């Protein structure tokens, strides 16, 4: 028996949930996720993880999300697991400094003080005249 898992990542559009009455929307969103999973993974046994359910119900029954990003996993028995998709964070490498080079920090220019000084000089000139 091979333990091959079929995994796919989908963004499910839940926009049509807004067509249902506002006190039924989150329930309808869960049903739409279930229908989407069975249609795309070709199986009727769909299990929705608690994280996905919490994501849909987070803002209450009346305001479910418009889209949801999920990972669908199908095992050999035909069971589908709907789980929340978590993006893998890419680690950015910082450019390495050479030993001989020194970091030069630039100081921000102080324009405000220069303007004040020039404004006070012009005021002094006007007073003398």
Image: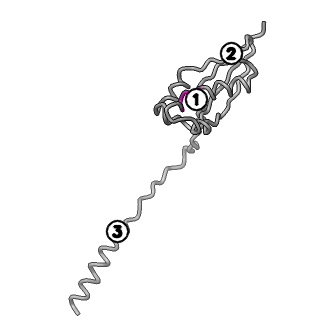
- Which stretch appears magenta? 25-30
Secondary structure category for the residue under label 3? helix
Find the distance from the CA under tag 2 to the CA under tag 1: 18 Å
Q: Of tags 1 and 3, which is closer to the observer?
A: 1
Q: Which mark is residue 28?
A: 1
Report the residue that reaches farthest toward the right: 1
Give the residue at mark 2.
Answer: 45
Report the residue that reaches farthest toward the front: 21
Find the distance from the CA under tag 1 to the CA under tag 3: 59 Å
Neighbours of disc 1 within 10 Å: few (<14), some (14-19), many (20+): many
User: Closer to the camera, 20 or 85?
Assistant: 20
Mark closer to the chain start, 2 or 3: 2
Q: Main secondary structure of the magenta part?
A: helix
Magenta region includes residue 76: no
- When asked about the image quadrant of residue 10, the answer is top right
Secondary structure category for the residue under label 2? strand
Q: In this view, does 119 lie to the left or right of 76?
A: left
Mark closer to the chain start, 2 or 1: 1
The residue sitting at 49% across, 50% down in the picture is 103
Please say if the residues under marks 1 and 3 sit with CB atoms less than 8 Å apart: no
Q: Is residue 48 left or right of residue 73?
A: left
**What is the basis of the colouring in this image?**
one colour
When the figure is inspected, residue 124 is found, relative to residue 33, above or below; the finding is: below
The residue sitting at 67% across, 24% down in the picture is 72
User: Closer to the camera, 97 or 123?
Assistant: 123
């Amino acid at each position: 028996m091979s333990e091959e898992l079929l995994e796919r990542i989908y963004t499910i559009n839940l926009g049509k949930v807004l067509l249902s009455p506002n006190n039924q929307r989150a329930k309808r969103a869960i049903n739409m996720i279930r229908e989407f999973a069975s249609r795309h993974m070709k199986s009727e046994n769909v299990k929705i993880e608690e994280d996905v359910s919490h994501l849909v119900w987070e803002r209450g029954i009346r305001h479910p999300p418009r889209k949801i990003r999920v990972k669908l996993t199908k095992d050999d028995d035909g069971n589908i697991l709907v789980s929340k998709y978590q993006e893998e964070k890419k680690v950015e490498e910082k450019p390495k400094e050479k030993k001989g080079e020194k970091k030069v920090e630039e100081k921000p220019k102080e324009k405000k003080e220069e303007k004040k000084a020039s404004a006070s000089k012009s005021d002094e000139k006007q007073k003398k005249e």
